[in-house]
Image (spheres, helix red, strand yellow):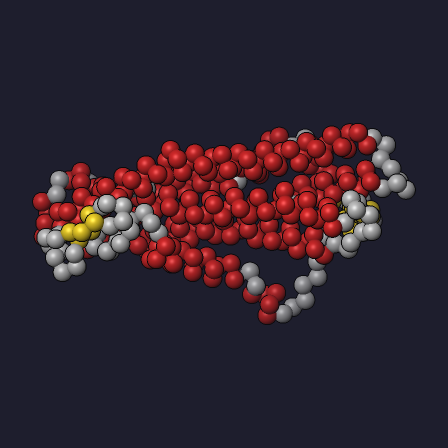
């Protein structure tokens, strides 16, 4: 939002013929640099996402599948192959007493597969999903602000007015300006968030230990917060001040109503629904997962958690 307000203000000063800017070249350079920074940030996020998938999450998924396949081979009398060529036990042939025959290091690996503790996995995925929901919510709010701006007659123009408190209020924008902002700023931001949502859920579900689940969740949050990091460290102080004093929609009225009081809870409901559907239906980390680890590992995990 800060970037958007500053960019629209510069466009106003550049295109306004009645009160032209005293330094239009500087404003053009600043607008170009700010737009390039947004493109750079989105490109860096996508680059990190693709390489996390290639070098990290794919390996983690493979290791989780191999560990669970070995577990199924030991614990069942009869097995079949899933779509990835991994072993899956035939229902009715499970032998829980065989868990005691597994080496301690194998027990430690299989019992820390996140799917062995469904509630813990659901909570961690929900935290991650809420972070993504916040990013998407900010993008939707950005779109709503753009749509509330009045149209202008000129093809590429923005109108604004200065308020009594020395801030700048954007009042109108042409359809072309709105379309460019949506295509080059808002939509890439939403697309990156959705890709990161799927990749993050997949990576966290395949993590080999509970400690690493926490650490990986923080690492994913770093990727999501990359735009704020670059804004704080790269953006010149003058640009930050101008951006903070420029508003696209200021003091939006929201009268007391059931809708205004509860609409933001929809994001929580959608996040819970997504996590539930992902864990129990959509996930492809352990296809045909039979939820047969928790019972075997309960005693082992209790022993490992006991103070020594």
Q: Position of residue 171 (x, y in %)?
A: 78, 51
Camera-side residue: 237 or 216? 216
Number of marks in the rendered image: 0
Can residue 80 be seen?
yes
* Residue 108 to residue 257: above or below: above
Q: Position of residue 22 (x, y in %)?
A: 86, 32
Q: Position of residue 281 (x, y in %)?
A: 34, 57
Position of the C terminus by quadrant: top left
The residue at 74%/54% (across/down) is: 149
* Residue 131 to residue 10: above or below: below
Quadrant position of residue 256: bottom right
Position of the N terminus by quadrant: top right
Camera-side residue: 56 or 211? 56
The residue at 17%/49% (across/down) is: 72
* Residue 92 to residue 238: above or below: below
In the displayed structure image, the side of residue 125 where residue 143 appears, left or right: right
Spot the residue most to the right.
18
Quadrant position of residue 50: top left
Q: Position of residue 170 (x, y in %)?
A: 77, 48
The residue at 55%/60% (across/down) is: 264
Can residue 304 be seen?
no
Camera-side residue: 109 or 176? 176
The residue at 43%/34% (across/down) is: 51
In the displayed structure image, the side of residue 135 where residue 255 appears, left or right: right
């Amino acid at each position: 939002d800060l970037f958007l307000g500053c960019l629209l203000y510069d466009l106003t000063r550049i295109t306004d013929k009645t009160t032209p800017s005293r330094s239009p070249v500087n404003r053009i350079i600043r607008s170009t640099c700010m737009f390039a920074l947004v493109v750079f940030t989105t490109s860096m996020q996508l680059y990190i996402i693709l390489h996390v998938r290639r070098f990290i999450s794919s390996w983690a998924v493979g290791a989780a599948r191999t560990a669970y396949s070995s577990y199924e081979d030991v614990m069942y009398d009869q097995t079949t192959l899933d779509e990835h060529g991994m072993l899956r036990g035939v229902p009715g042939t499970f032998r829980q007493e065989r868990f005691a025959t597994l080496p301690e290091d194998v027990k430690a690996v299989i019992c820390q597969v996140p799917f062995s503790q469904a509630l813990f996995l659901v909570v961690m995925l929900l935290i991650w999903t809420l972070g993504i929901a916040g990013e998407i919510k900010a993008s939707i709010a950005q779109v709503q602000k753009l749509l509330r701006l009045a149209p202008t007659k000129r093809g590429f123009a923005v109108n604004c007015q200065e308020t009594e408190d020395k801030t700048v209020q954007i009042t109108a924008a042409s359809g072309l300006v709105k379309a460019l902002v949506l295509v080059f700023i808002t939509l890439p931001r939403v697309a990156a968030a959705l890709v990161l949502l799927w990749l993050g859920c997949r990576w966290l579900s395949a993590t080999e230990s509970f400690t690493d689940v926490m650490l990986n969740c923080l690492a994913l949050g770093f990727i999501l917060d990359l735009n704020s990091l670059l804004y704080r460290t790269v953006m010149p102080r003058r640009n930050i001040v101008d951006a903070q004093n420029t508003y696209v929609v200021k003091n939006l009225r929201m009268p007391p109503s059931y809708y205004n009081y509860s609409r933001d809870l929809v994001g929580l409901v959608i996040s819970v629904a997504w996590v539930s559907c992902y864990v129990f239906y959509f996930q492809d980390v352990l296809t045909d997962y039979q939820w047969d680890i928790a019972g075997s590992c309960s005693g082992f995990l209790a022993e490992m958690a006991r103070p020594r």
